Amino acid sequence: MNYFNVPYAPGTLQAVAYRAGREVARTSVQTTGAATRVELVPDRASLAGDGRDAMPVTVRALDAQGRAVPGDNSQITFVVKGEGKSIGHGNGDPNSHEDEKGPTRHLFNGMAQLIVQSNDDSSGDLVIEASAPGLAPARLVLPVRQVAPVPFQQVSDAPFTVVSYWRISPASATRPDPSQTLADFDMNTWESGEPPMLRQVDATGSAAVTGPFRIFRASSTPRAQLAEGLGTLHFTGITGRAEIWLDGRLLGKKVDYASGALRVALPAGQGSRQLSVLVEGQTGQAAGVQGRVMVEPAQDAR
Protein backbone atom coordinates (compact mmCIF):
# COMPACT_ATOMS: atom_id res chain seq x y z
CA MET A 1 0.00 0.00 0.00
CA ASN A 2 1.19 3.52 -0.80
CA TYR A 3 0.33 6.40 1.53
CA PHE A 4 0.47 10.10 0.62
CA ASN A 5 0.24 12.72 3.34
CA VAL A 6 -1.01 15.96 1.81
CA PRO A 7 -1.61 19.11 3.90
CA TYR A 8 -5.33 19.93 3.93
CA ALA A 9 -6.61 22.87 1.94
CA PRO A 10 -10.10 23.47 0.53
CA GLY A 11 -10.42 22.72 -3.16
CA THR A 12 -9.75 19.70 -5.37
CA LEU A 13 -7.62 16.72 -4.39
CA GLN A 14 -6.58 14.76 -7.45
CA ALA A 15 -4.72 11.47 -7.82
CA VAL A 16 -3.17 10.36 -11.09
CA ALA A 17 -1.78 6.83 -11.64
CA TYR A 18 1.01 6.07 -14.11
CA ARG A 19 2.42 2.83 -15.46
CA ALA A 20 5.74 2.97 -17.32
CA GLY A 21 5.38 6.73 -17.51
CA ARG A 22 1.91 6.59 -19.09
CA GLU A 23 -1.24 7.76 -17.29
CA VAL A 24 -3.60 4.84 -16.63
CA ALA A 25 -6.12 6.25 -14.12
CA ARG A 26 -7.27 9.53 -12.62
CA THR A 27 -9.74 10.45 -9.87
CA SER A 28 -10.47 13.44 -7.70
CA VAL A 29 -12.57 14.66 -4.77
CA GLN A 30 -13.67 18.21 -4.05
CA THR A 31 -14.39 20.14 -0.93
CA THR A 32 -18.16 20.60 -0.93
CA GLY A 33 -20.38 23.34 0.32
CA ALA A 34 -23.21 22.96 2.78
CA ALA A 35 -25.97 20.52 1.89
CA THR A 36 -28.91 22.13 0.09
CA ARG A 37 -31.07 19.27 -1.18
CA VAL A 38 -31.87 15.58 -0.95
CA GLU A 39 -31.23 13.18 -3.82
CA LEU A 40 -32.78 9.74 -4.52
CA VAL A 41 -30.87 7.39 -6.83
CA PRO A 42 -32.68 4.15 -7.83
CA ASP A 43 -30.78 0.95 -8.49
CA ARG A 44 -32.92 0.24 -11.58
CA ALA A 45 -35.40 2.03 -13.79
CA SER A 46 -38.52 0.04 -12.84
CA LEU A 47 -40.03 -2.72 -10.71
CA ALA A 48 -41.96 -5.87 -11.60
CA GLY A 49 -45.46 -5.76 -10.15
CA ASP A 50 -45.41 -9.27 -8.66
CA GLY A 51 -45.23 -8.28 -5.00
CA ARG A 52 -41.75 -9.78 -4.68
CA ASP A 53 -39.50 -7.44 -6.66
CA ALA A 54 -37.51 -5.11 -4.38
CA MET A 55 -35.00 -2.35 -5.09
CA PRO A 56 -32.48 -0.33 -3.07
CA VAL A 57 -32.62 3.45 -3.46
CA THR A 58 -29.57 5.49 -2.44
CA VAL A 59 -30.32 8.60 -0.41
CA ARG A 60 -27.77 11.46 -0.45
CA ALA A 61 -27.39 15.07 0.56
CA LEU A 62 -26.06 17.34 -2.22
CA ASP A 63 -24.64 20.85 -2.15
CA ALA A 64 -25.61 23.67 -4.48
CA GLN A 65 -23.29 22.31 -7.20
CA GLY A 66 -24.74 18.78 -7.06
CA ARG A 67 -21.85 17.24 -5.14
CA ALA A 68 -22.47 14.64 -2.43
CA VAL A 69 -21.77 16.12 1.01
CA PRO A 70 -19.93 13.42 3.02
CA GLY A 71 -20.28 15.16 6.37
CA ASP A 72 -24.04 15.70 6.34
CA ASN A 73 -26.10 13.67 8.85
CA SER A 74 -29.55 15.15 8.24
CA GLN A 75 -32.63 13.24 9.36
CA ILE A 76 -34.60 12.13 6.28
CA THR A 77 -38.37 11.57 6.37
CA PHE A 78 -39.72 9.08 3.81
CA VAL A 79 -43.17 8.84 2.27
CA VAL A 80 -43.77 5.87 -0.06
CA LYS A 81 -47.08 5.57 -1.88
CA GLY A 82 -48.65 4.19 -5.01
CA GLU A 83 -47.96 0.64 -6.23
CA GLY A 84 -45.42 -0.33 -3.59
CA LYS A 85 -44.14 0.11 -0.06
CA SER A 86 -41.02 0.59 2.03
CA ILE A 87 -39.62 -2.59 3.55
CA GLY A 88 -36.79 -0.93 5.47
CA HIS A 89 -33.82 1.41 5.44
CA GLY A 90 -30.30 1.69 6.81
CA ASN A 91 -27.32 4.01 6.90
CA GLY A 92 -24.28 1.83 7.62
CA ASP A 93 -23.73 3.30 11.07
CA PRO A 94 -22.87 0.38 13.41
CA ASN A 95 -23.90 2.47 16.41
CA SER A 96 -27.32 3.42 15.06
CA HIS A 97 -30.37 2.13 16.94
CA GLU A 98 -32.98 3.82 14.76
CA ASP A 99 -36.12 1.93 13.77
CA GLU A 100 -35.32 0.31 10.43
CA LYS A 101 -39.03 0.16 9.52
CA GLY A 102 -39.96 3.67 10.69
CA PRO A 103 -40.60 6.80 8.61
CA THR A 104 -37.25 8.49 9.34
CA ARG A 105 -33.53 7.81 9.13
CA HIS A 106 -30.42 9.92 9.68
CA LEU A 107 -27.80 10.05 6.97
CA PHE A 108 -24.42 8.63 7.97
CA ASN A 109 -21.44 10.28 6.25
CA GLY A 110 -23.93 11.87 3.90
CA MET A 111 -25.73 8.70 2.78
CA ALA A 112 -28.48 6.20 3.56
CA GLN A 113 -30.40 3.54 1.69
CA LEU A 114 -34.14 2.86 1.37
CA ILE A 115 -35.51 -0.46 0.09
CA VAL A 116 -38.88 -0.49 -1.65
CA GLN A 117 -41.01 -3.39 -2.92
CA SER A 118 -43.88 -3.60 -5.38
CA ASN A 119 -47.42 -4.59 -4.38
CA ASP A 120 -48.99 -7.89 -5.40
CA ASP A 121 -50.45 -7.94 -8.92
CA SER A 122 -49.75 -4.23 -9.47
CA SER A 123 -49.00 -1.80 -12.26
CA GLY A 124 -48.60 1.96 -12.31
CA ASP A 125 -46.18 4.13 -10.33
CA LEU A 126 -44.40 3.78 -7.01
CA VAL A 127 -43.69 7.25 -5.63
CA ILE A 128 -40.98 8.05 -3.06
CA GLU A 129 -40.74 11.44 -1.35
CA ALA A 130 -37.78 12.28 0.88
CA SER A 131 -37.41 15.46 2.91
CA ALA A 132 -35.15 16.91 5.61
CA PRO A 133 -35.19 20.17 7.61
CA GLY A 134 -33.45 22.95 5.69
CA LEU A 135 -33.00 20.89 2.51
CA ALA A 136 -34.98 20.86 -0.73
CA PRO A 137 -36.98 17.61 -0.87
CA ALA A 138 -36.62 14.88 -3.49
CA ARG A 139 -39.33 12.97 -5.36
CA LEU A 140 -38.77 9.78 -7.33
CA VAL A 141 -41.33 8.02 -9.53
CA LEU A 142 -40.61 4.38 -10.32
CA PRO A 143 -42.75 2.60 -12.96
CA VAL A 144 -44.21 -0.70 -11.80
CA ARG A 145 -44.66 -3.13 -14.70
CA GLN A 146 -47.51 -5.59 -14.82
CA VAL A 147 -46.19 -9.15 -15.02
CA ALA A 148 -47.71 -12.62 -15.10
CA PRO A 149 -48.98 -13.76 -11.68
CA VAL A 150 -46.60 -15.88 -9.63
CA PRO A 151 -47.80 -19.52 -9.65
CA PHE A 152 -48.84 -20.72 -6.22
CA GLN A 153 -50.54 -23.60 -4.47
CA GLN A 154 -53.71 -22.77 -2.59
CA VAL A 155 -53.14 -23.17 1.15
CA SER A 156 -54.95 -26.17 2.57
CA ASP A 157 -54.90 -28.24 5.72
CA ALA A 158 -52.46 -31.13 5.70
CA PRO A 159 -54.24 -34.50 5.66
CA PHE A 160 -52.17 -35.71 8.59
CA THR A 161 -49.58 -34.72 11.17
CA VAL A 162 -46.53 -36.88 11.85
CA VAL A 163 -45.66 -37.51 15.50
CA SER A 164 -41.91 -37.10 15.96
CA TYR A 165 -39.15 -36.43 18.52
CA TRP A 166 -39.49 -39.76 20.32
CA ARG A 167 -37.82 -40.89 23.54
CA ILE A 168 -37.15 -44.58 24.24
CA SER A 169 -36.97 -46.01 27.76
CA PRO A 170 -34.43 -48.58 28.94
CA ALA A 171 -35.53 -52.21 28.69
CA SER A 172 -37.37 -53.70 31.64
CA ALA A 173 -37.89 -57.31 32.72
CA THR A 174 -41.25 -56.44 34.29
CA ARG A 175 -44.08 -54.34 32.91
CA PRO A 176 -43.30 -50.66 33.67
CA ASP A 177 -45.80 -47.93 34.38
CA PRO A 178 -46.48 -46.34 30.94
CA SER A 179 -47.28 -43.01 32.65
CA GLN A 180 -44.04 -42.78 34.60
CA THR A 181 -42.51 -39.30 34.66
CA LEU A 182 -39.40 -38.50 32.66
CA ALA A 183 -37.43 -35.58 34.07
CA ASP A 184 -36.95 -32.70 31.63
CA PHE A 185 -33.21 -32.71 32.27
CA ASP A 186 -32.83 -36.46 31.71
CA MET A 187 -30.75 -36.71 28.54
CA ASN A 188 -29.16 -40.09 29.25
CA THR A 189 -31.61 -42.61 30.73
CA TRP A 190 -34.05 -42.45 27.82
CA GLU A 191 -32.53 -42.35 24.35
CA SER A 192 -33.84 -40.27 21.44
CA GLY A 193 -35.07 -41.81 18.21
CA GLU A 194 -37.34 -41.74 15.18
CA PRO A 195 -39.11 -44.66 13.47
CA PRO A 196 -38.03 -47.28 12.71
CA MET A 197 -37.30 -47.84 16.40
CA LEU A 198 -36.71 -51.58 16.81
CA ARG A 199 -34.74 -52.94 19.75
CA GLN A 200 -33.51 -56.50 20.28
CA VAL A 201 -34.92 -58.43 23.25
CA ASP A 202 -32.21 -60.47 25.01
CA ALA A 203 -33.18 -62.31 28.17
CA THR A 204 -29.56 -63.07 29.10
CA GLY A 205 -28.36 -59.49 29.20
CA SER A 206 -25.03 -60.49 27.69
CA ALA A 207 -25.25 -59.16 24.15
CA ALA A 208 -27.91 -56.48 24.50
CA VAL A 209 -30.28 -55.21 27.17
CA THR A 210 -32.34 -57.30 29.51
CA GLY A 211 -36.14 -57.51 29.42
CA PRO A 212 -38.93 -57.52 26.84
CA PHE A 213 -40.61 -54.21 27.79
CA ARG A 214 -39.89 -50.70 26.51
CA ILE A 215 -41.83 -47.44 26.44
CA PHE A 216 -41.78 -45.25 23.32
CA ARG A 217 -42.92 -41.71 24.16
CA ALA A 218 -43.57 -38.49 22.22
CA SER A 219 -45.56 -35.28 22.66
CA SER A 220 -47.79 -33.85 19.95
CA THR A 221 -50.30 -31.02 19.57
CA PRO A 222 -53.04 -32.05 17.12
CA ARG A 223 -54.52 -29.48 14.76
CA ALA A 224 -57.58 -27.72 16.18
CA GLN A 225 -60.19 -29.68 14.21
CA LEU A 226 -58.60 -33.00 15.22
CA ALA A 227 -58.27 -32.01 18.89
CA GLU A 228 -62.07 -32.01 19.20
CA GLY A 229 -62.37 -35.79 19.04
CA LEU A 230 -62.31 -36.06 15.24
CA GLY A 231 -58.84 -37.55 14.89
CA THR A 232 -57.27 -40.98 14.65
CA LEU A 233 -53.84 -42.14 15.80
CA HIS A 234 -52.43 -44.27 12.98
CA PHE A 235 -49.46 -46.52 13.77
CA THR A 236 -48.22 -47.77 10.42
CA GLY A 237 -46.15 -50.50 12.03
CA ILE A 238 -45.62 -51.94 15.52
CA THR A 239 -43.72 -55.16 16.22
CA GLY A 240 -44.64 -56.83 19.50
CA ARG A 241 -47.59 -56.57 21.81
CA ALA A 242 -48.48 -52.96 22.50
CA GLU A 243 -50.58 -50.69 24.71
CA ILE A 244 -51.37 -47.16 23.51
CA TRP A 245 -51.61 -44.56 26.29
CA LEU A 246 -52.47 -40.85 25.89
CA ASP A 247 -52.12 -38.49 28.84
CA GLY A 248 -52.30 -41.44 31.21
CA ARG A 249 -55.37 -42.98 29.57
CA LEU A 250 -55.36 -46.38 27.82
CA LEU A 251 -56.70 -46.00 24.28
CA GLY A 252 -56.11 -49.42 22.74
CA LYS A 253 -54.05 -52.58 22.57
CA LYS A 254 -52.25 -54.76 20.04
CA VAL A 255 -52.37 -58.33 21.31
CA ASP A 256 -50.03 -60.22 18.99
CA TYR A 257 -46.25 -60.10 18.53
CA ALA A 258 -46.28 -59.99 14.72
CA SER A 259 -45.64 -56.72 12.93
CA GLY A 260 -48.78 -54.84 12.05
CA ALA A 261 -50.58 -51.50 11.81
CA LEU A 262 -52.91 -50.12 14.47
CA ARG A 263 -55.49 -47.31 14.55
CA VAL A 264 -57.06 -45.88 17.68
CA ALA A 265 -59.48 -42.98 18.11
CA LEU A 266 -57.98 -39.74 19.40
CA PRO A 267 -60.08 -38.40 22.29
CA ALA A 268 -60.85 -34.69 22.59
CA GLY A 269 -58.32 -32.58 24.42
CA GLN A 270 -56.44 -29.30 24.10
CA GLY A 271 -52.77 -28.44 23.91
CA SER A 272 -49.82 -30.80 23.89
CA ARG A 273 -50.69 -34.51 24.38
CA GLN A 274 -48.29 -37.10 25.76
CA LEU A 275 -48.33 -40.34 23.80
CA SER A 276 -46.78 -43.48 25.34
CA VAL A 277 -46.51 -46.81 23.52
CA LEU A 278 -45.68 -49.71 25.82
CA VAL A 279 -44.22 -52.54 23.71
CA GLU A 280 -43.56 -56.12 24.81
CA GLY A 281 -41.28 -58.13 22.53
CA GLN A 282 -40.21 -61.76 22.28
CA THR A 283 -36.81 -63.02 23.36
CA GLY A 284 -34.37 -63.04 20.48
CA GLN A 285 -36.59 -60.82 18.33
CA ALA A 286 -36.58 -57.08 17.62
CA ALA A 287 -39.61 -55.13 18.84
CA GLY A 288 -40.79 -51.54 18.81
CA VAL A 289 -42.38 -48.83 16.69
CA GLN A 290 -41.16 -49.61 13.19
CA GLY A 291 -43.28 -47.22 11.08
CA ARG A 292 -44.22 -43.58 11.38
CA VAL A 293 -47.07 -42.48 13.65
CA MET A 294 -49.63 -40.03 12.28
CA VAL A 295 -52.62 -38.06 13.54
CA GLU A 296 -55.25 -38.21 10.80
CA PRO A 297 -58.86 -37.11 10.37
CA ALA A 298 -61.16 -39.86 11.56
CA GLN A 299 -62.91 -40.17 8.20
CA ASP A 300 -59.58 -41.19 6.63
CA ALA A 301 -59.49 -44.39 8.72
CA ARG A 302 -59.94 -47.47 6.63
Image (cartoon, helix red, strand yellow):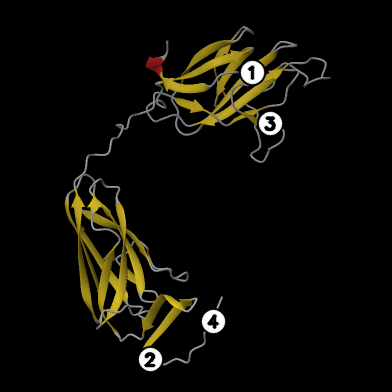
Nearest the viewer among 132 and 53 is 53
Contact (Cβ within 8 Å) of mark 2 with mark 3:
no
Residue 190, disc: 3
Whole-number angstrom distance, CA of label 4 to CA of label 1: 73 Å
Q: Quadrant of residue 244?
A: top right
Nearest the viewer among 166 and 114 is 114
**Residue position marked by numbered label 4 in the rendering:** 3
Whole-number angstrom distance, CA of label 3 to CA of label 1: 14 Å
Q: Nearer the viewer, mark 2 or mark 3?
A: 2
Q: Residues within 10 Å of mark 2 (few under 14, many from 20)?
A: few
Q: Which residue is drawn at 39% across and 30% down?
A: 224
Q: Nearer the viewer, mark 4 or mark 1?
A: 4
Secondary structure at numbered mark 4? loop
Relative to 208, is 117 above or below?
below
Is residue 6 toward the left or the right of residue 129 in the image? right
Kind of residue at badge 4: Tyr
Is residue 132 visible to us here?
Answer: no
Q: Earlier in the sequence, mark 1 or mark 2?
A: 2
Q: Which of marks 2 and 3 is nearer the N terminus?
A: 2
Q: Nearer the viewer, mark 4 or mark 3?
A: 4
Q: Position of residue 270 (x, y in %)?
A: 44, 32
Whole-number angstrom distance, CA of label 1 to CA of label 2: 83 Å
**Residue position marked by numbered label 1 in the rendering:** 288
Kind of residue at badge 3: Trp
Whole-number angstrom distance, CA of label 2 to CA of label 3: 75 Å
Nearest the viewer among 69 and 250 is 69
Is residue 28 visible to us here?
Answer: yes
